[in-house]
């Protein structure tokens, strides 16, 4: 069997999530990892003696012994790493947010397409069957003409005073609630509704962080008079795990969706979608979504298997390309550009 040779850069929380997942793909061989911390590299080498380890990611990329690399470093470093990977003809799965500048995102998107390399960004919620079901129902006008969307995202990421510790405490590093949490919900809106024509009236505020926003609100306007309001708070102690809630209001019904399921109200039955008149409840576990190996959520497995499969067979596609993530990057920066404070 032809093998896909993989490297991983950044062995923190996401690197340690992605390693065991991609390691279960039958056609994948993990060749190398890189981290600036010798502690994690030493530990990995102890248990996986054949693994190549590098403290400088450039050495991993310049070794030219891998087909694809998974980039899990702090967000400000994604651009340089992706650029050097491209120069070495290496396909990239890059964690979100893609970059810290729309211009860099566009440049990378064009460079990878020109080289014919697989390019993907880890906007994992695009692999959630609930949001794919919502996308299908909205596209089919099941709730009539879409009028407004209310989108919220909560987590307990920062719940005590931050004295500027760690990369997440500075926006230029990719820190703050907008890059870290907001990117996900702005991306899922981009996936379901397409690119907005306007982003306006953004507001940011902090509870614990000194230099970045802990919460933000923004408004989006789309073609056909569709509007959306977004609120994100990464300092909400009432949520043990991150929770995204999106409501779609239409002229003939509404959809309420979160990570785990959806409720659909329609004023007439739609047997082709298995919907009765009135309320319909659809739990995520009733939607086709099986994976051979589970860490943190099925979407994490689906997205990495897609990455490896697309390297093996270039006719296969991935759901979130660099071009898709570049549009989301534009939306994120529009929020920053018109925000009233911070
Ligand atoms: N998709 C998701 O659900 C999700 C969740 C959390 C984080 N993320 C994203 O993943 C990325 C990493 O986040 P994290 O939570 O794993 O951060 P982390 O701080 O836990 O890990 C980052 C790791 O990168 C290493 N590192 C830093 N600079 C490096 C360099 N130049 N070369 C090699 N290694 C380097 C650090 O030593 C650390 O081990 C960020 O872009 C973040 O936004 C995505």
Image (spheres, helix red, strand yellow):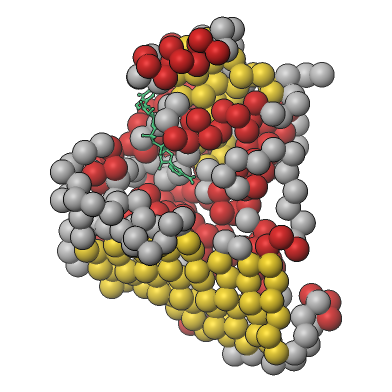
| Quarter holding residue 21 | top right
Where residue 282 appears, x then y in whole percent? 70, 71
| Quarter holding residue 78 | top left
Looking at the rendering, in which quadrant would you find the C terminus?
bottom left
**Residue at left offset 29%, top offset 42%:** 168
Whether residue 54 is visible to the viewer of this picture, yes or no, is no
Q: How many marks?
A: 0
| Quarter holding residue 257 | bottom right
The one of 90 and 44 positioned closer to us in this rendering: 44
Whether residue 43 is visible to the viewer of this picture, yes or no, is yes
As drawn, 207 above or below 10: below
**Quadrant position of ligand 1:** top left
**Residue at left offset 52%, top offset 48%:** 123
**Residue at left offset 17%, top offset 64%:** 341
As drawn, 240 above or below 169: below
Where residue 328 appears, x then y in whole percent? 45, 54
The one of 132 and 79 positioned closer to us in this rendering: 132
Q: Residue furthest bottom?
A: 267
**Residue at left offset 20%, top offset 55%:** 208
Where residue 87 appears, x then y in whole percent? 49, 21
């Amino acid at each position: 069997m032809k093998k896909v040779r993989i490297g991983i850069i950044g062995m923190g929380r996401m690197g340690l999530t992605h390693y065991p997942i991609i390691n279960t793909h039958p056609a994948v061989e993990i060749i190398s990892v890189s981290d600036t911390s010798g502690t994690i590299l030493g530990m990995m080498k102890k248990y996986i003696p054949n693994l190549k380890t590098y403290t400088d990611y450039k050495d991993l990329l310049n070794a030219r012994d891998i087909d694809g690399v998974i980039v899990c470093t702090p967000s400000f470093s994604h651009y340089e790493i992706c650029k050097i990977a491209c120069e070495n003809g290496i396909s990239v799965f890059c964690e979100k947010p893609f970059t810290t500048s729309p211009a860099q995102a566009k440049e990378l998107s064009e460079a990878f397409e020109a080289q014919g390399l697989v390019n993907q960004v880890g906007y994992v919620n695009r692999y959630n069957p609930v949001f794919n079901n919502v996308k299908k129902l909205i596209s089919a006008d099941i709730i009539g003409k879409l009028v407004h969307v209310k989108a919220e995202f909560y987590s307990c990421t920062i719940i005590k005073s931050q004295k500027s510790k760690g990369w997440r405490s500075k926006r230029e590093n990719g820190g703050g609630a907008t890059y870290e949490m907001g990117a996900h919900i702005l991306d899922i809106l981009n996936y379901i509704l397409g690119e907005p024509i306007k982003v306006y009236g953004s507001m940011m505020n902090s509870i614990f962080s000194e230099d970045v926003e802990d919460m933000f609100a923004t408004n989006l306007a789309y073609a056909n008079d569709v509007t959306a309001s977004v609120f994100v708070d990464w300092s909400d102690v009432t949520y043990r795990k991150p929770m995204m809630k999106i409501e779609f209001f239409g002229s003939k019904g509404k959809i309420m969706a979160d990570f785990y399921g959806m409720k659909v109200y329609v004023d007439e039955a739609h047997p082709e979608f298995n919907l009765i008149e009135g309320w319909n409840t659809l739990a995520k576990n009733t939607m086709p979504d099986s994976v051979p190996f589970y860490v943190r959520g099925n979407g994490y497995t689906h997205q990495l298997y897609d990455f490896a499969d697309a390297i093996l067979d270039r006719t296969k596609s991935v759901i979130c390309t660099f071009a898709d993530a570049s549009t989301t990057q534009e939306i994120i920066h529009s929020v920053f550009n018109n925000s009233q404070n911070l």
